[in-house]
Image (tube, helix red, strand yellow):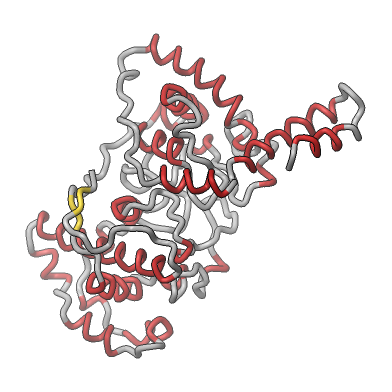
Amino acid sequence: MAPHTIDALLLKYEKGGAGRSRLSSILNAVVVVTSMLSPVALAQDEASASEEPPPQVSRYANNPARLAVALQDGERIYRQHCRACHGRRGNGHGEAARFLNVEPRDFTTGVYKWRTTPTGSLPGDRDILRTIANGAPGTTMPAWRGRIPGADIDAVAQYIKTFSDRFATEEVPAAVPMPKTMPDLGDEAAQRGRMLFVLMQCWTCHGVQGRGDGPASDTLTDDDGNPIEAYDFTSGKFRSGRRPVDIYRTFTTGVNGTPMPSYDEALMIGGDAFQDLEQYRPAMASDGLAPLREFVSHMPTTEEIWSISEEERRAWANQSRWDLVAYVLALSKQRGRARLYLTTPPYRTD
């Protein structure tokens, strides 16, 4: 929407009237958002999502004076750049929200989808900074890295926490450890990942081909009861980052506020948990159940998994998550959208 179009619409309202003021704020918000959705801007956002996040913020813990300055700056920056979508009270009901393809985050709940902290918990400062800096590809949430100074991103991250009482009453847990290297994510890993994708019922939401059209996809709701779409892995737009370790992190911690669970201990099960393979036939229609039966026959039993050391058990679950990552990336690659390093181990993830 061009500026001259906005001026034409504003002429329908009396000069200086309340209607004009409100329409002006809405339309200008739309201009801001749509300008960030140009092909160049989207390409920049996708590239930013693969960059390392800013350093963890910790200097405010014992420095209330510095925090007070940050909150004052953060409120100003929020009004200028964030309020149109997220709303004056941070509840996601901004004047531009109705025009967006994905509802803006409601900061008042303290529920953040993408974190390094365990499922259900508050995010760390670094998690909030990462999302603000890198944006959420595939949505209208742009990457603010390079658009505003790093100090402004820092300040607004502190300010948006004030919308939820959870940050005053709950401790932010330590981040879940992430691996420093990744294994080969080639065809063999992707094939194992496909079997896990079937066994863990991922296809019921995300679809057999990962397109977000599974048999349960029409029934999904978020924690507030609002309809929510299962993610289309073939889109190549990974909202929490497109590096393999970013996808690995999402599998580990889950997506708070949505039906997407954490696949941490959930993967610490053996082949004996999958006795009735007939229920998976819809997901294996192209190949039949023989490949799945073969995969399950080589899995250890649940008792064997829980009889080994915790370190070995974690290694088992970690490998399974990497296999899922390999398969998800393979789904994306089929559409020619994944520009990722899949077969060059070991790759540093830190």
Which residue lies at the image location 30% right of the left edge and 15% below the top edge?
62
User: Which quarter shows the C terminus?
Assistant: top left
Q: Is residue 29 above or below residue 287?
A: above
Residue 266 in picture, x, y percent from top left: 28, 62
Query: Image check: 85 left or right of 302?
Result: right
Residue 247 in picture, x, y percent from top left: 34, 55
Residue 249 in picture, x, y percent from top left: 31, 51
Asked whether 338 or 202 is in front, the reply is 338
Q: Is residue 162 above or below residue 105?
A: above
Which residue lies at the image location 56% right of the left edge and 67% below the top edge?
219
User: Which quarter shows the N terminus?
Assistant: top right
Which residue lies at the image location 66% right of the left edge and 42% below the top edge?
97
Query: Image check: 34 left or right of 72?
Result: right
Asked whether 319 or 311 is in front, the reply is 319
* Residue most extreme to the front: 40
Labels in figure, total: 0
Which residue lies at the image location 17% right of the left edge and 70% below the top edge?
302
Residue 61 in picture, x, y percent from top left: 32, 19
Q: Is residue 238 above or below residue 87?
A: below
| Snapshot quadrant of residue 304 | bottom left
* Residue most extreme to the top: 65
